[in-house]
Each structure stands twice: as C-alpha cells, then as structure tokens.
C-alpha cells in the first residue's frame, strides 16, 4: 500500500513543483491544499483497508459457521455418526461438499474416535474445545495458521434425538487481504490520482483568483505596503480620509483624528465632508480646493474617487485648515518680498560698482571715496550700534533685515539710542518673535511709505522678566473704533494697500501661545504698537 502511495506522490509532484518557489502565494496554496487532500486520502485508504480486512474476517467466519451447521444437520452426516464409519460413497460425498463450498478440511469426530479427517498431520481443534462441544453443545469459530496460511475453523455439535453424537469441524482458507486489495488497487489508485489532479487544478484556479484579487502582490509585499501606507498617511500634515461605495469610513490618519475627533472606523464623518465625498462618488469626478465649514472652522479639501476597471469603489479626501494655508501664503509672500529686495539690492550695488569702475578708469579716486563713505558709513554705524545693543541673534537679524527692506521702500527706520536688549531668547521664542515683529514692522512700513515723513521709530528693552519692544510709524494713525477689531482674522484698515487682514491676527495668536500681549495707541506721529514678552 505504501509503495503505491509513494508512487502517486512521486508522479504527481516531481515535475509540477520542480520549478515552483514555495515563497509565492500560489505555490503555497497549491502545495498546502494538495498535501491536505493527499493526507486525507491516505487516512481514508488506511481505514478502507481495515474495513475490507474486517469484512473478510467476518464473512469468512459466518461462512464457515454456516457450512458447519448445515453439515451437522445433514441426514447423510448424521448417518455417518450413527454408523461411526465411512465408505467410498460417503467420502465422495464429502469431497463433493468440499469442492462446492470451498472447504479445505472436514473433521468428523465422536468422543471416542475420529470418523473422518483428510489430513492427520494437522490439528484443527484442541481436546478442551472438543470437550466443550461434546458436553455443552458449544458452537465456536477461531482462526489458526496451517503451513503459514490462515484458516477459519468452525465447529458445531451433531444432534440426534436430543443427544450429541459428535462434532463437525470445517476449515476455510481465509482470502488474502493483500490479494483482495490488489484486485481493487488499480481502480482505487486511479480514483485517488484523479482526485489529486482535480484538487491541484482547483487549487491553481483558486490561487490565481486570490492573487488577482490581491493585485498580484505577495502577502509579505502587502504587509510592507500596509506599513508603508500607514507611515505615509500619518506623515502628511493634511487630514486624509477614505470611504467605500457604501459611505463607510475605511481609513483616516492622525491629523484627521485631531481635526474631526475621529477615533475609530465606526465614527460618523462630519456631514459637510460626507456630502462632498458622496458627490465625488456619485458624479465620479475630482473636486479640488473646495472650502467647507465644519464646526465654524474653514477647511480646504480635495476629493478624488477610487476607480478600478471603470467601477467607482469609494473616495479619498485630503483636508487642511484654511488658517494654516493662509499662514503659509503669508510666509511665502514674505519670502517673495525678501527675494525682491535682494534682487533690487543687487541691481543697486551693480550700478554702484559700474560707477566706481568708471571713476577708476578716469582715476577720479576722490569721487570713489565720497561714494563709499556716503553709501556705507551711515549704514555701518547703524548695524554696529545694533550689534552692540542687541544680544539675541534672531532679533538682531530681524531688525537689520527690516532696516534694508524699509530703505528699499523709501522708509527710514530710526532705532532709539536707549534701545538695549541683553537677553538671549530660546529657539521657540525667537521663531515666534520673528513672526510677531516681522508683521508689525511690515505694517508700519506700509503705513509710513504713504506718509510725508516716511519714518519708523523702534525701541526695545528687557526690564526684569519682561521684554518690551515699541514700533511707531509716521502714518495716519488708527481710528479708535478700529482698534478693538484690529486683531480679528480677515479684518484690515488698509485694503487700498493690498493687505488681506491676517498679519495682526497671526501676531495675536503667536503672542497668546507664549503668554505675551500687545497694545495699540495713537501718537503725534502715527500709530504705536507695544509688544510685551515674558522672558521666563
């Protein structure tokens, strides 16, 4: 049996798995499924063999006992026991019975002697077994080996007028289990081979179906993609959300969690966002830069449908707070202004170099001295004084940068002679102060350049645990009714200058984060902004 099974395994898998790497999902599915089926067939085959063996033994026992009982009740056999002898006719009869029934041996015995037995060299039953039959009329069967062959022995008493005359024992050679199994082996193994081949074909089809549904990726690749996707969406500064065709939430990142208070996939989306995503799915179209209001907060959202094989499966949305975008726009505008200033400065110095070159060619060295003195002496003194009086590098850079920016706009910044700041700010405070002073000074420059005097006055000091900086312009001042609204988002008193009303809102927001404050008042020159910053 094992030989046939191993042969099937060899023929089935030798060539099929020769070039297949078991690292692939398809190979694993095919191999696992086939192995399970073969194992199940192997167990079934073993159980099938046991059943056949039991059937053969049971049927052999029944047959032997039935023939033995029949013989014990046959009149001719009873006559033999009465006479206690056999002749040629009776022996022919017994041989005929053996031929017709397949009996190998027949034993006729009385308590005193053996009437008939065709092989005196063997013993079918023991004296104790014979005694049980003589005395109690016991019917029994057993199996014995004769010349390495297994026989089933059945023994029954012979009755006549309620008395036991003797016993009849018959012996049947048991049909070989291997012989019977070999008769069915071709059909059985053909069936097993067919089942295995069908299993392999089904496993191949299922594996390709699964591989297709996984877009051709292996499980390890999918695991890496999942981790990669999770890292990507959580590294984004935008809120990222995805829903399926049934409008159920399928994905969200940490930013979406903080924006919309989403902590699990069963959480309902804000109705405003859900409606716009449903619109993208129903119309199968992208929606860009859509402004929506959620809980009184403005968001800029982009929505794209998820499409596969021209079938819409859901939608993905990315959202960012409008305030954050506006802040970026302001920062980019500042960078643009600085770059324009540098470009203008480059042009100015280029013209100056050309003029100096011309004086060099004409050997007019006195004019060169005057140009260099007039151009650089005043600025150098201003910068040197600032370096001596301001220890914080960020604050110093802001003042110097704004000084040249004001010059490009035709405005002169005048630093107070008593201005002195000995404190060095931490990194967070320095960044905040850059935004705060940058916006205030820019506003002052915008106001001063449209005035007659075109000047700005800046002073600063660190008194105790507080840093105080004042910025005064020569502009028109601020109406008392506008002062309370001045720091509201989107509010501006200088629309004619192109302001969008976010600078002072950012100033107030940054100050509140670091525990500072700001005051506004009017002076004889224009408007005065005073900034108070805690140093500890």
Image (cartoon, grey):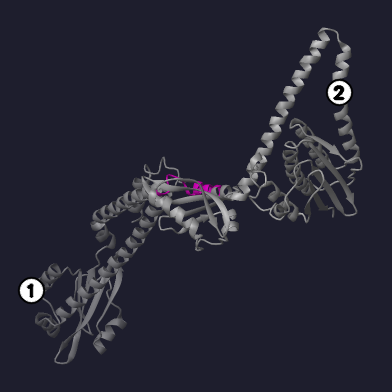
Given residues 366 and 217, the one toward you in this image is 366
Q: Quadrant of the N terminus?
A: bottom left
The answer to whether residue 494 is left or right of residue 213 is right
Estimate the x, y position of residue 256 in percent, counting from the top left: 57, 55
Quick one: SS at disc 2? helix
* Residue visible at 52% across and 47% down in the picture: 225
The answer to whether residue 421 is left or right of residue 181 is right
Observer able to see residue 30 = no
Q: Which numbered disc flags the more N-terminal residue, 1 or 2?
A: 1
Residue, disc 1: 89
- How many C-alpha atoms fall within 10 Å of the one at disc 1: few (<14), some, or many (≥20)? few
Residue, disc 2: 374
* In the depicted structure, whether residue 413 falls above or below residue 107: above
Estimate the x, y position of residue 132 in percent, counting from the top left: 28, 86
Question: What residue span does the magenta drawing correspond to?
Answer: 213-228
- How many C-alpha atoms fall within 10 Å of the one at disc 2: few (<14), some, or many (≥20)? few
User: Which residue is most to the bottom?
Assistant: 162
């Amino acid at each position: 049996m094992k030989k046939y099974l191993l042969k099937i395994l060899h023929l089935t898998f030798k060539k099929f798995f020769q070039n297949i790497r078991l690292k692939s999902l398809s190979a694993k599915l095919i191999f696992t499924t086939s192995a399970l089926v073969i194992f199940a067939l192997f167990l079934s085959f073993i159980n099938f063999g046991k059943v056949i063996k039991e059937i053969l033994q049971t049927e052999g026992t029944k047959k032997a006992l039935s023939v033995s009982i029949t013989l014990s009740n046959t009149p001719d056999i009873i006559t033999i026991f009465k006479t206690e002898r056999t002749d040629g006719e009776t022996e022919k009869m017994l041989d005929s019975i053996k031929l017709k029934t397949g009996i190998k041996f027949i034993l006729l015995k009385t308590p005193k002697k053996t009437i008939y037995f065709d092989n005196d060299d063997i013993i079918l039953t023991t004296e104790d077994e014979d005694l049980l039959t003589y005395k109690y009329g016991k019917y029994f069967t057993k199996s014995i080996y004769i010349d390495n062959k297994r026989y089933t022995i059945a023994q029954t008493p012979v009755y006549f007028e309620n008395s036991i005359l003797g016993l009849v024992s018959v012996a049947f050679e048991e049909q070989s289990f291997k012989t019977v199994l070999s008769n069915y082996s071709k059909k059985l193994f053909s069936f097993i081979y067919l089942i295995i081949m069908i299993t392999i074909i089904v496993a191949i089809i299922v594996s390709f179906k699964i591989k297709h549904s996984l877009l051709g990726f292996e499980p390890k690749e999918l695991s890496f993609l999942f981790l990669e996707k999770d890292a990507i969406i959580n590294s984004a500064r935008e809120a990222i959300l995805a829903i399926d065709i049934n409008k159920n939430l399928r994905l969200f990142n940490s930013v979406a969690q903080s924006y919309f208070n989403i902590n699990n996939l069963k959480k309902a989306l804000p109705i405003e966002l859900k409606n716009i995503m449903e619109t993208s799915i129903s119309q199968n179209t992208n929606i860009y830069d859509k402004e929506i209001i959620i809980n009184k907060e403005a968001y800029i959202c982009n929505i794209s449908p998820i499409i596969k094989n021209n079938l819409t499966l859901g939608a993905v949305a990315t959202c960012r707070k409008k305030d954050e975008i506006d802040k970026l726009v302001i920062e980019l505008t500042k960078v643009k202004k600085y770059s324009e200033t540098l470009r203008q400065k480059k042009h100015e110095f280029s013209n100056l170099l050309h003029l100096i070159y011309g004086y060099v060619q004409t050997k007019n060295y006195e004019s060169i001295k005057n140009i260099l003195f007039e151009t650089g002496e005043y600025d150098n003194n201003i910068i040197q004084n600032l370096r001596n009086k301001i220890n914080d590098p960020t604050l110093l850079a802001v003042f110097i940068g704004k000084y040249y920016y004001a010059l490009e706009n035709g405005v002169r910044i005048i630093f107070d002679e008593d201005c002195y700041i000995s404190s060095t700010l931490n990194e967070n405070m320095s960044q905040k102060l850059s935004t705060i002073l940058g916006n205030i000074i820019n506003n002052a420059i915008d106001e001063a350049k449209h005035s007659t005097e075109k000047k700005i006055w800046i002073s600063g000091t660190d008194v105790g645990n507080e840093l105080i900086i004042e910025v005064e312009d020569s502009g028109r001042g601020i109406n008392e009714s506008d002062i309370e609204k001045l720091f509201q988002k989107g509010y501006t008193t200088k629309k004619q200058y192109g302001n969008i009303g976010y600078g002072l809102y950012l100033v107030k927001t940054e100050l509140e984060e670091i525990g500072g404050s700001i005051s506004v008042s009017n002076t004889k020159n224009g408007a005065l902004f005073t900034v108070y910053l805690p140093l500890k």
